[in-house]
Every structure is written in C-alpha cells, then in structure tokens.
Image: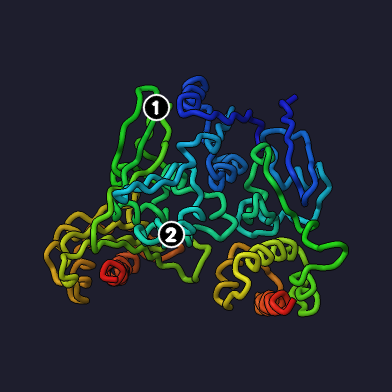
Amino acid sequence: MKDFDYAAPTTIDDAVGLLAKHNGRAKLLAGGTDLIVQLREFFREADVVVDVKKIAEVMDLRVEADGRLWIGAGVPCYRIYRDERVANSRGGLVDAARIIGGWQIQSRASIGGNLCNSSPAADSIPALIAERAVCHVAGPGGRRTVAVDEFCTAPGKNVLAAGEMLVGIEHPATAAKSASAYERFIPRNEMDIAVVGLGSWVRLDPTGKTIAEARIGLGAVAPTPLFAAEASQWLSGKPATEETFAQAGELAKKIAKPISDMRGPADYRVHLVGVLVRRTLATAVSRAAS
Amino acid sequence: MPRKHHIETTINGESTDFLCEARQSLLEVLRDTLHLTGAKEGCNNGNCGACTVLLDGQPVDSCLVLAVEVQGASIETVEGIAECGHLHAVQQCFLEDAALQCGVCTPGFIVAAKALLDRKPQPTEEDIRFDLAGNLCRCTGYDKIVRAVQNAAERLAAK
C-alpha cells in the first residue's frame, strides 16, 4: 500500500477542515472494509486517511422517544442488529446489516460506509429507501440533508460534493402497524453480492388488513438503488394479500433496468424483482401485524 | 521516511506497544513486528478470515484494520486462546475431530468459533454455519469444522 498519513479528528468541524486542507487527497475511514481494500489495490489514493470513529456524533446510535432513529455514519453493522430497539422497528435494515459480509466484516463495516461506497448492489440502501431514511451531510457550507433515494448518482458515485462528509442517517418517527423487510437473492446463504436486493416497508390501517402506505426500494437492477414510486403509490388502500403483493411486483419490475453479468442475466434479475417484492411485502406485513 | 506512530494496546492480556506506519495493517504488525504469526494472511482483502482476531471482543479481519486504529484497544489472537498451557475446548476438538488439513484457515476458525461460543454457548448447526461464513476453508468441506464446534460446545457445557 502507498504511504499515507493518518488523522483521527474528534469533531465534525475538524474532519471537514482536514478534507478542505487536503483538497480531494484526504479519504474518510469508517470501518475500512471498502477503503482499505481500495487503497491496497490502487483503486483509490490518499495522502491522508481521516478516521471518523473518534467523533461522538458519527458513532452514536440513538432512538428518540417518538421512534426517530439516528445512526451515526460510522456505526458498525453488528451494533444495529444487536440493538433491540432497532431490531423491533427497522426490520429491513436489520435484515441487511446481518448479511453484509460475514461476522468479521459486520464488526467493522458501517451503514454509512455502505451508502458512501454507493454500490448499485449495496445491501443496506434498498432497506433505507423503503424506511424513508435521510442522510445528514456536513461540509464547508454547513449542514444539509438528502433523502437516501437521491444519495447515489452512479456506480460508486454520490451527491457528496468536494469537502463534504456523511455524518449520519436519520429515520423518521415510527408509525403504528408499520414494519419493513429486506431480502436479497444470492446462490448461497451468505457472503455474496446481491443478484437483486429488495427492501419493502408497509404501514397497515387499524384493521391490519389493508395497506395504508408502502415503500419499495430496489438494488442491483440499475446503476443506482431505486425507489419504486409507482408500485409504492399503487399499494395505498389495497388489501394485504398475495395477489396485491404480486401486482406490486409487476409494477416494480417496470423500472428495473439491470445489466447481465456473471451473477445473472438481465431478464432473470427482472423476474427476481417480482419474486422479492412479493416475499418482502409478505414479511413486512406479517411483522407489521404482529 | 514515512512517519511512525507509537501505538499502545493490550494483546492477549499484556500491555504492548509498537511503532507502525499508517499504511500498515494490524495483521502486518502482529506478524512482522510483534512476531505473533498465528493469524495468517490468506486473501488480504477481507474474504477468507484466516487473519481473524478479536478487537475489543469482536472478531475482525486484521488485514482490514490499520494498526494505528487499535490505539487503546484490546486484542486477542489465537496465541491467547489456550489457558495455562491447556488447549481451549475449541482447539482440542479441532484436533480430535480432524477439523483441519493444511491448517492455514485454522487459527481464524479457532478465534471466530471461540467468539461464537462465548456469545452462543448452545449454537444450532445453522448458527455455526452462518456465524463462521466469514472463514473460508478450501480443504475440509466444513462438515468436520462444524462438528468440532458442536463438540466443543458440548464439552464447555459439561464443565
């Protein structure tokens, strides 16, 4: 690995200052499970690596009284799925955090890093889209927020401008009878990259039999993770039945524009979108009802 | 000359300090500076788990941790698993059940399996296969490893 310097600031201001000072030659380090590999294999270069894990806000995992959830950008996956408050309210994100790499990776890799790496197949992003999460960004111009739906712009690219960093991800307050689920299709049970990844969130009406509101996020079927707007909106007011889930799957398939690669041909991926919409909606509905 | 960082840490219960460059991985420092060669370099990119160590109790791939990141942390390597000259139940069962062939993956499996049994003393077969998915073995086909971990769990429960 090429030599670089190391800094571990304790405030966001100091971290942003370091990014400005090094003018694109500083790289942020959270869990390192992407960055260290990229530096070692010369996909990225850095003069200085800025470790954000000493910044309290970046390592904070906090649930507010109304259910709003703050996930600091450096919080590793294992802290998400070990936290009962999160497990009970954000099942989809927890499903994703449990299958990002193996245990060793989950000890280090953060959801914030998964977002910033901006892979089209990132496991956490479809779940975050479904759960209506928002990114909090800090930069030389101060703070701003961006919906997760809008964060990724191309494979490996996102809306972070020069000198900006992701501070954390915020989930909105929880609603009664709501829940989410994430599922990915891979040929084995663990340690692989999604052929298709799919996150669904539903809110049921008080009877528990009708979908009041739903959101569907797709992964690995386009250059960026996608929010399936038409399918999501169509679900409002529909009975929570297998027929409904299947029809939503057909609508979601319309926006899938996958590539063919060694993980699967494009038409197969489109087919899987329908299957996984059905399955994740069924899981989310059963979680919401219980 | 690149700047050297002075890092103070605890390794296998003993206060240990070392000098390292920012670009050096924890695995490099463990093996080349501290001569703890139990953790192995397999893939050096976080796929194989042969370099697994415990960092503040959590299993990590030491090839994906910069040595400068472990300032103040506690590290446990495979060298620290045997107690007072006696093999840990996981190590003993790997031996008795022939859960290794070439042995390169074994230190990583031992560390990860011990961490698994510390958290889940009575794991199901699925627990074992899922939690050890970050450790690759290209020799055994895994069945003997899973059986060794099951037997170690029984032995620890009987203690």
Whether discs 2 and 1 lie on one chain: the answer is: yes
Hey, which quadrant is residue A278 in on the image?
bottom left
Q: Secondary structure at mark 2?
A: helix
- Residue B1 x, y percent position in the rendering: 75, 24
Q: On what subunit does the disc labeled 1 rest?
A: A
Residue at the extreme left of the image, as rendered = A237
Hey, which quadrant is residue B131 in on the image?
bottom right
- Residue B35 x, y percent position in the rendering: 84, 47
Q: Amino acid at mark 2?
A: Glu
**Which residue corresponds to mark 1?**
A139
Q: Residue at x 41, y 27 (%)?
A: A162
| Viewer-proximal residue among B19 and B118 | B118
Q: Could you tell me if the residues under marks 2 and 1 are in contact, i.e. CB atoms within 8 Å?
A: no
User: Residue A61, relative to residue A50: is it above or below?
Assistant: below
Q: Is residue A137 left or right of residue B112?
A: left
Q: Residue at x 34, y 49 (%)?
A: A224
Q: On what subunit does the disc labeled 2 rest?
A: A
Q: Amino acid at mark 1?
A: Gly
Q: Give how far apart the Cα atoms at labels 2 and 1 are.
A: 33 Å
Q: Using the image, tell me which numbered label, if any, was put on residue A31.
A: none
- Is residue B141 shown to the viewer in this render? no
Q: Secondary structure at mark 1?
A: strand
- Residue A246 x, y percent position in the rendering: 22, 72
Q: Please give the count of numbered marks on the rendered protein.
A: 2
Disc 2 packing (10 Å; few <14; some 14–19; many ≥20): few
Q: Quadrant of the N terminus of chain A?
A: top right
**Which residue corresponds to mark 2?**
A84
Disc 1 packing (10 Å; few <14; some 14–19; many ≥20): many
- Tag 1 or tag 2, which sits nearer the N-term? 2
- Residue A64 x, y percent position in the rendering: 34, 46
| Viewer-proximal residue among B38 and B116 | B116
- Is residue A55 shown to the viewer in this render? yes
